[in-house]
Image: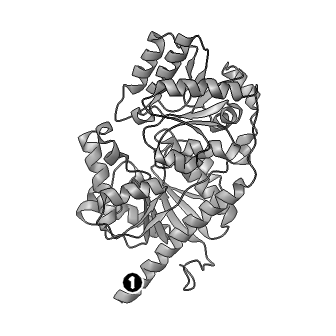
Amino acid sequence: MVQGTGPLTRRVPLRLAFTHIPRQLWAGGHNYQSNLFASLNQFRPGEFAPILFAGNRDDADLSSLAEIWGVEVVRSAAFEGRFGLASALALGLDQKAVAEFRTQRVDAVFESARFFGWRLPYPAVAWFPDLQHRRLPHLFSAAARCRRELGFRAQIASGRTIMLSSESAHRDFKRYYPKATNRICTVRFATHPSPALLTTNPAEVIAQYQLPEKYFYLPNQFYRHKNHQVVVDALTVLKQRGVDVVVCASGSTEDQRERGYFDHVMAQVRSRGLEKRFLHLGMIPLSHVYALLRASTALVNPSRFEGWSTTVEEAKSFGVPMILSDLDVHREQTAGAARYFGTDDPVTLADHFIGASQDAEVLVIRNLVPHQDDRVAAFAADFADTVLQTVQLFQQRRRGRG
């Protein structure tokens, strides 16, 4: 249990429960967890023991998380799908999940796309990665939008500490939940890839995928809001101008909200004769993702919505030039240090492709930028403070009731 009375005082590692986010389902969320665990281990050693709960059928990417020092992986049927949601809503407690928490001697819970009930006997932080279902409701089925909104409102009504990833998300939260009185914490994440992921030779990866020395990298999953279409449209503009630019994309092609989206985009690529200009590499090893990012002419993120972009943070960590959709959160992340274009403006995007190509040297392989550790340490400190202060407030309330 937490030792001492101050919000940041602790001698025994706090056993903090997480639920597994499969990379195939949400690469950004998976990378977020991996980076968070590594950051806590490096910059807040001995303070936290992440206990990662996963279903019995979860995929192999658990092994890379289990290799991070201090992380414990627990498999249980209680964490498969939405197993305990009905119990959490009707009875106020996901009883089977909480039984596992007790068995593993959990001290606190980090909720992400999972609600464990308003009677949860642990201090809890609920992470709202974004409020996309409110800003872009047409991208969700009625059932998915209702389920997501119900979960958020249940967490708000249960008094959870709400953790957001940007000031942009904070503004959205205040707009859509103006009566919420929860404690709100904005924790901007920063990335520091494992050294093991940076040993792959970028030149060899470029050759493996038969890419030119100059290419733009788009490592977004094929969700409609990620807006691959505007990139295809920009490449069409460039083809009409006689300008040859290559964009390589990687990531999952599965969007449960719109299963035909990937096929639709690739059909557009073929019908416009862009097969050599828009290349999809599929789900590739994370070491290849970093290799391609480090050697790219620029990162491209055309998304219509982000809570706090993982790909932008990864590009920043290596000093990779960026071409980004003109979102408030993208400007917040980059402080103006990128090229921006409207989400429905392929002409400006095409111009940025030309400008970035002209500015780029032939094959530059970048390393981590100086002072990146400072940014990651600040992320770890903000996250730690959020959790430890939540624990302290929980204990104070319990003493007050006693």
Dot 1: few (<14), some (14–19), or many (≥20) neighbours within 10 Å?
Answer: few
Asked whether residue 17 appears in the rendered view, the answer is yes
- Which secondary structure, mark 1? helix
Query: How is the protein colored in the picture?
Result: one colour
Q: How many marks?
A: 1
In depth, the one of 342 and 133 nearer the eye is 342
Whether residue 114 is visible to the viewer of this picture, yes or no, is no
User: Residue 111: image x %, image y %?
Assistant: 43, 60
Q: Residue at x 67, y 18 (%)?
A: 210
**Vertical placement of 289 versus 401: above or below?**
above
**Foreground residue among 13 and 360:** 360
In the image, is 131 to the left or to the right of 240?
left
Q: Position of residue 125 (x, y in %)?
A: 44, 65
Q: What amino acid is at disc 1? A: Arg
Q: Quadrant of the C terminus?
A: bottom left
Figure check: 395 above or below 271: below
Residue at (58% x, 24% y) in the render: 247
Q: Quadrant of residue 267?
A: top left
Q: In front: 359, or 280? A: 359
The residue at 32%/50% (across/down) is 148
Is residue 167 left or right of 286 when viewed as pictured?
Answer: left
The quarter of the picture where residue 263 lies is top left
Q: In front here: 113 or 276?
A: 276
Establish if 364 lies above or below 6.
Answer: above
**Residue corresponding to mark 1:** 398
